Amino acid sequence: MGQNITRKIIADHLISGDMVPGAEIALKIDQTLTQDATGTMACLQFEAIGLPRVKTELSVSYVDHNTLQMGFRNPDDHRYLRTMAAKYGIVFSPAGTGICHQLHLENFARPGKTLIGSDSHTPTAGGVGSLAMGAGGLSVALAMAGEAYFISMPKVVKVNLTGRLKGWAAGKDVILKLLGMLTVKGGVGKVFEFAGPGVQTLTVPERATITNMGAELGATTSIFPSDEQTRRFFACMGREDEWVELLPNTDAEYDEVVEIDLSALEPLVAQPHMPDRVCTVRELAGLKVDQAAIGSCTNSSYADLKTTALALNGKKTHAETDLLISPGSKQVVKMLARENLIEPMLDAGARLLECTCGPCIGMGGSPTSAGVSVRTFNRNFEGRSGTQDGQVYLASAQTAVNLALAGEFTDPAQWGEAPARVELPQSAPSIRDLFIFPPADGADVTVLMGPNIVPLSKFEAMPDSFAVKVLLKVEDNITTDHILPAGAQITALRSNIPAISEYIFSRVDEGFVARIKKEGQGVILGGENYGQGSSREHAALGPRHLGVKAVIVKSLARIHRANLVNFGILPLLLVNPADYDKLAEGDSLTILASAIPAGQTAAITTANGRRIDVTNDLTEKELEIIKAGGLLNYVRGQQA
Ligand code: MIC
Ligand code: SF4
């Protein structure tokens, strides 16, 4: 059978397991990336493993999320990350150099390699043919220690691209189209592999936008072949020697096929508050736009910002619309500066921000009350912008800049003739010497830790049986932003679990933390796709710290499921979705953990003797991990 590229890379890295969709497989990981919001925990976990040096081909530690550095907490964490990187052989990217995924794409990602990152948008590197996946911090720490990464073998979906983008349609519209078709849970257990004649018409920045936001489908990852476009990108980045061709066999087989005609796409937008609430820009004509923000790991490339600058040239943004621009990297800024493309942005009235995540994670740039913000980002979950009733729409840079000029949604037919799509220059100024490469031997380096870093407390093993109450009932598509909100104030506490736990579910139900503290333990009842969104393991660690023993849901998002296992929370799936309606907050349940078989159905009982059938998709080993109280306990037990 002809191989697709996903299966080729998996076969090359397979340590154990059968490549049958749904079966557990273990993969060798070549590269890792971490960022500062999840990385401090991941690095502490790596240190706890006790190795003198990372065992990957390359590990990079980026500082890009918590760069507001209000008070000592984040600067202290960043100093820890810098010294820790030097000691253990990790490349360090200081604050302001750029956003992890943009930097990794430009400087380190390689076709055919495996990469895991403690950030859900790690699949950005799939734009150059890496098999790149988001993971919890502990999984990344283990990969840095040379351990395998376990996933369930994905189905491979061929996204057959035909035609070519026309007019104002952009790479972003390809992924918005897919989200509209498949929804935020349409990709669970799948890799989206782009193929067909349309592929060669898309540049690497456009491809990276698509693979980046494939995370919003709930997919394991997304990937493009490595072809002539990819070679040109590597040449521009000054690393053509790292390029290799990676194509599917001509008779490659796939588990599923989705068709997209690029020629038929028009500018699209995702409406509040879900990335799959997609409609055309045209349909919203007349809606006032209070803010536009261009940047984030989705659309902050040279191509996106050159498009922006050319559209702004000689014009002014609407007087009642703020335009914020965050470049993806200092390389992008240097490329723009070289072509005098910064001036048109400044003269148009745009605000040029640092090369960081910024407004995407609520680090400044929040919209006005109920304000409409059009963002080139990947997530528009309620409250994520920092304004609880902010109305965030997701769109391409082309759309955002045109709406910033008009001050309202307009029909793209009124935007004039679309300019030619931006091509990459032959070469770009390098920023390679801004990375801090580790010394050959880090033995003498002292790792510096500030008071914000509180070591993880030890979790108890799971009791054989426990009586608990349902302490919170939530609906479908609960995101990790619902479980643990982002924003400057809360994200500053990522290396202090007791402190950050005070905010668990704070935006969903202010009383939750007090309730669980009073009860000592409890369970969460949820709907479909529970835990979608980010990779932050704090959304499992915090609940675990507070005493959450199990989540009982209709279905789970991939990375959050892994984080629950890693920190010893039982992820149980309702066999009869109708039981969701029968259970209420405050109901008492008895769970016989010792009688829950891996991958099979078991019953839990309510106080009035009613039986609720639950199942799980856990392997024997995962169940052992949970019963041990989490992966750290399990590994300690194995060592003993
Ligand atoms: C996000 O976009 O939600 C984040 C912030 O980058 C997260 C990581 C985190 O919470 O630190 C992600 O995508 O995994
Ligand atoms: Fe940063 Fe936003 Fe990308 Fe997350 S989605 S890595 S917060 S830019």
Image (cartoon, helix red, strand yellow):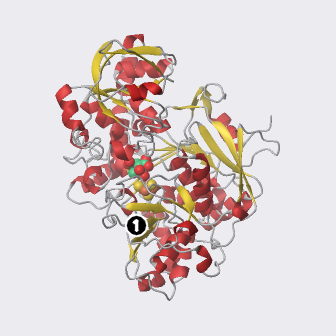
**Depth check: 571 or 302 in front?**
571
Vertically, is 180 above or below 474?
below
**Depth check: 2 or 192 in front?**
192
| Residue at 30% in and 51% down | 491
Vertically, is 364 above or below 345?
above
User: Counting other residues with Cα less than 10 Å from the Cα at mark 1, is it few (<14), some (14-19), or many (20 or more)?
Assistant: many
The answer to which image quadrant residue 515 occupies is top left
- Give the amino acid type for the residue marked by disc 1 in the picture: Val
Direction from residue 625 to residue 492 in the image, left or right: left
Ligand 2 is in which quadrant of the figure? bottom left
Residue at the disc numbered 1: 372
The answer to which image quadrant residue 237 occupies is bottom right
Count of marks overlaid on the render: 1
Visible in this render: residue 131? no
**Depth check: 349 or 46 in front?**
349
Spot occupied by residue 43 in the image (x, y as percentages of width and height): 36, 42
Vertically, is 291 above or below 35?
below
Visible in this render: residue 102? yes
User: Quick one: quadrant of the N terminus?
Assistant: top right
| Residue at 45% in and 45% down | 533
Direction from residue 163 to residue 21 in the image, left or right: left
Look at the numbered disc 1 and give the secondary structure of its residue: strand
**Depth check: 494 or 528 in front?**
528
